[in-house]
Amino acid sequence: MSDAGGERSLAYLSTIPVSRVKLLTGKRASSLNAAGIESVTDLLFHVPRRYIDRSTTAAINDVPLGEEVTVVGTVQTIKMRHVRKNLAIINAVVTDGETFLFVTWFNQKFRVRQLAEGTQVALSGKIERKKGRLEMKSPEADVLDRPGESLVTGRVVPVHPGVKGVGPGYLRRGIHNAVKRSLPVSDPIPAEMRERLSLMDRSAALQSIHFPESLDEVVPARDRLVFDELFRLEVALALQKRRQIDEAVGIAHVRASDGLMAELVKGLPFPLTTAQQRVIDEVQTDMARPHPMHRLLLGDVGSGKTVVAVAAMLTAVDGGHQGAVMAPTEVLAVQHFLSIGGLLAGAGMAPPLEALGMSDLFTQTDFDRPVRIALLTGSNAEVNYRESITRSELLAEIADGAVDIVIGTHALIQEGVHFHHLGVAVVDEQHRFGVHQRVELREKGAEAEPDLLIMTATPIPRTLSMTLYGDLDVSSIGRDEMPPGRPEVETVALAKTPAAEEQWLERVRDQAAAGHQTFVVCPLVEDSLKIEAASATAEHKRLSGLLPDLRVGLLHGQMVPADKAAVMAAFRDRQLDVLVATTVIEVGIDIPHSTVMVIEDADRFGLSQLHQLRGRLSRGVGPNYCYLVAEPTTTESEERLAAMVASDDGFVLAEEDLRIRGTGTVFGARQAGAADLRISDIMRDTQLLVDARREAFAMVAADPGLVDHQAVSAEVQALLGDAVAWLFVS
Ligand code: ADP
Ligand code: MG
């Protein structure tokens, strides 16, 4: 293994297959490949999950009894007995040269092979004294050394994460070979930056993270490698932002102080909050630039994002462009159509919509310039300027620019909807809207790329907005900046018992008597909308029986759209007291008189979903009640419910969610490179993330082609792979 100049780059090492490493050839190489370790670079990033410091592990005889300890010794004997059909007992005697320790495992047959006589092993668990003997039951056991093999390190033994098919000793010594043969590695980070951030030398960091002389070396070594990993990601994001925004041609919208938005503001039933004004200003400033906007608007449920969306679209419409709103579901698209139509009508800028029926509509002659909006989904084609319209007529009017604002689902950009001159797209609830949809959107713009505003009520902790969404500009409406007058929601976790059920039923009856309404959310059935619908139907029947005096409705995903719309309209018009629904109501539904929500089997929902659901409440009248009915079966689900009871702050809950689930699960394919974080833990490494982001964006700003930073460029390309390749075509 060599490279020009004696130092090897990680980019170069990522082209060397792991099978070239001594001890890791053949079958072991295949096993490593199966675990995602293909190159020497991959192997170098397979860092220890912990270390055993043999200079501080106490003698077996000296450790405190009954406490978690780690001791080191040699296996003297190991035997397995089959006591009965499903019970094998493995007994080992381990000695540190002075004291014998009697170790027992149950049914862990692999121990016999793992711990052959003569193996040096680190055992972690509790030691007890029984009948004068020291015993340990079912400890963790890490092989330090097999008979005849010599330890590769001194006092501190690294424990690398296990790889199926490769013994821990081979793995450790293989990695040792790889480190020895790879060093010194070149360092693409400029010396000035390394000094300023007190980053350790990269070669030293690789040596120290795998084979530290003392445990003190581990933290700075890890910090260095974490920084590098985050820096690579942030460089990719900075380049992506540069290519998608600063170098792309957009529409320079004109900010008219006497335009449609000003007219809307005058006609709103409430003054804009300071936060709404600020965010609208950020949006309009972006829109006025000749480059496309890619902005993320973070605002908890009920923070008043709709007005911001309308402001963006009216800014486009003012200059003769069109706006589009894309919602994740049809129900939500209808909801947006109603609320945007309502806002415009309320301000006297368009004819009023008659609920959902749209039966008697006005002519547009009363308005010198009505804002024309349309709803277009798989099953709806409606407009606010004509009583009825066919789908093909509507498509034609969108294409020739007769329609100002089109509201639909995400399919709007995926299917062949042709805009006359799309100026801005607003995407509601971004989590299903990824990078490649953004590319499709870009292709919608004829000569210039439309502006993009992504709105989400799923609060994104700062750490994620810097990684997952790191190429977007962010606006946010803080918790303390919400529109005034949202009633409190009291959240109660209830067991699944008849007494608890009577408690919430009583509340439902009370509230119905006061003219208020209840959502009953039925459990989520993964992968089967049919079963989900069936269980909601059964629950509807059961509750109708339990609440004979109340009007109980049903809404689920399997209903035809017209029926769904009719049920929603009836609920909105207070012709129903209770709505039994599946999670189709999750986002956006705005029912001012709803005061109670019962979430059944709440333990099956994720934390952000629970928060979204509860966000349907507190829409007008109060007080509000949310009942989480569950028999939690895991610690995680218990923690989720406790978090819901403790807080209604979406940002707090999002952080909590990350803590409970770990960050790995949130990445997925959303963002190139983000899924590749192997060493970093963005919840823990937040400061390094902040540093890496600042440095990466500064570097790309000063040197957009990375011509003075070829090594950085090569490393990002080599380590982040195909996903970032497009960033580097010139
Ligand atoms: P979001 O989409 O962020 O969840 P909405 O835009 O639907 O929030 O607004 C939530 C509720 O608050 C709506 O009923 C809306 O009419 C109301 N609202 C919005 N802005 C204000 C404001 N500045 N003052 C008072 N109420 C407002
Ligand atoms: Mg909304």
Image (cartoon, grey):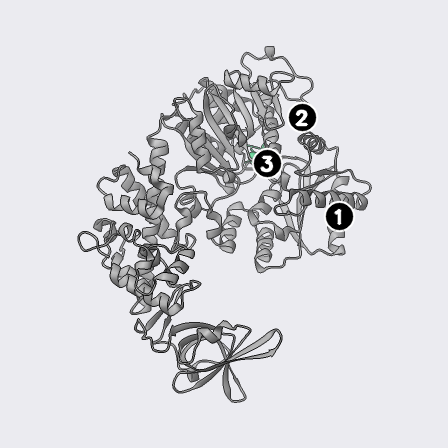
Residue count near mark 3 (Cα–Cα under 10 Å), binned few <14, some 14–19, many ≥20? many
Name the mark nearer the viewer: 2 or 1. 2
Which quadrant of the rendered structure holds the C terminus? top left
Check if mark 2's residue and mark 3's residue have beta carbons within 8 Å: no
Q: Which residue is mark 3?
A: 588
Task: Please state which of residues 348 and 206 is positioned toward the viewer in this rendering.
Answer: 206
User: In this rendering, would 699 be left or right of 158?
Assistant: left
Image height check: is 134 above or below 450? below
Q: Distance from label 2 to label 1 (Cα)?
A: 30 Å
Residues at marks 3 and 1, CA–CA distance in whole angstroms: 25 Å
Going by the numbered disc 2, the residue's amino acid type is: Leu
Q: Which mark is residue 356?
A: 2
Give amino acid for label 1: Leu
Question: Vertically, is 223 above or below 373?
Answer: below
Badge 2 element = loop
Ligand 1 position by quadrant: top right
Q: Position of residue 563 (x, y in %)?
A: 70, 31
Label 3 vs 1, first from the N-terminus: 1
Say whether disc 2 or disc 3 marks the residue closer to the N-terminus.
2
User: Is 200 or 723 nearer to us in this picture?
Assistant: 723
Which residue lies under the disc numbered 1? 505
In the image shown, does 694 or 535 lie closer to the viewer?
535
State the image coordinates of residue 106 (x, y, percent, origin top left).
55, 75
Ligand 2 within 8 Å, label 3 CB: yes
| Left or right of 682, for residue 360 | right
Residue 257 position within the rendered picture, expressed as x and y whole percent measured from the top left: 44, 20
- SS at mark 3? loop
Q: Three-letter amino acid code at disc 3? A: Gly
- Name the quarter where the N terminus is drawn: bottom left
